Amino acid sequence: PRVTLMPGASHLQPFLELGLEPGSGDASLRVGAVKVMLSCTTGALQPSLEELRPMVMNAHKMGFQLAIHAVEEEAVDAAVTSLLYARESRPDSDPRHRIEHCSECSPEVLRKLEGSGILVVTQPGFLYYSGRRYLSEVTEDAQALLYRLRSLLDAGVNIAASSDAPVIEPNPLIGIYAAVSRCADSGEAIGGSEGVSAYEALKMYTLGGAYASFQEADKGSIEVGKLADFTLLDQDPTSVETEQIPQIKVTMTIIGGRVVWQAS
């Protein structure tokens, strides 16, 4: 696998002392965004907004992209607020700052994201693997705010999709299925109006991920001059019935133009 490493915000100085700047490394291992863990699980924002802003500004001024982990609505709002604050200090830059997860996205946060240039890196697969819990513990109105895709795309927000493995299974086809169907593994739908097409979901897992790490010139699509990393599938997820997407099998994996795995 090719790895983009995210330095933790509190450990940024040792990287700088070693001369490791944004994008340092090669196609196999490189330095990516600075990661900030923002949580509201205790009922209070940790770190507080007052602590978060200088942390974000420090990395932003050094030219690093930021990736802020934010799940709860309050955390997502604080993350967006702090990133917008940083952008105002250098409006001419293109940092592609990211919200990791953006699990609960209120209408107010959606309005802030629109036109902000902030990316969302989200995990549709949680709808499938954690869907039964959401259905039993989250009100119907709040379910529509979970892992929003259609609304984010319509607002012009760039989305990358991932699995968050090992929290859930890494299989992207499950995530693509969930992004399209909005269904839990029980078959029950969660916020069905937020579903997207299979093509849009596939793009989130390919070009979306490449764009989110400044690698769209090298990865994310099969084109001359790119790294030739791709898989062959036994069916096309954009042409089969939605219910068939999870059953699609990988027949071959190619990295850098070389076959590294093949189904027997």
Image (cartoon, helix red, strand yellow):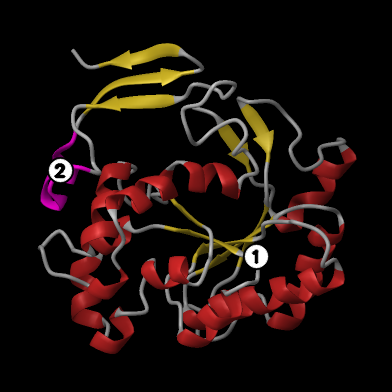
Q: Is residue 17 left or right of residue 149?
A: right
| Residue 46 appears in the rendering | no
Residue visible at 62% across and 65% down in the picture: 118
| Residue 133 appears in the rendering | yes
Q: Callout 2 environment at 10 Å: few (<14), some (14 to 19), or many (20+)?
A: few
Magenta region, mostly helix, strand or loop? helix
Q: Callout 1 environment at 10 Å: few (<14), some (14 to 19), or many (20+)?
A: some
Q: Secondary structure at mark 2?
A: loop
Q: Is residue 136 above or below residue 148?
A: below
Q: Amino acid at mark 1?
A: Gly
Q: Is residue 101 above or below residue 174?
A: below
Q: Secondary structure at mark 1?
A: loop
The residue labelled by disc 2 is 240
Q: Which mark is residue 171?
A: none
Residue visible at 76% across and 34% down in the picture: 24
- Image position, residue 227 (x, y; %): 55, 23
- Compare marks 2 and 1 and give the one earlier in the sequence: 1
Q: CA distance from mark 2 to mark 1?
A: 33 Å
Q: Is residue 80 magenta?
A: no
- Image position, residue 200 (x, y; %): 37, 53
- Image position, residue 80 (x, y; %): 63, 75
The magenta segment: 239-248
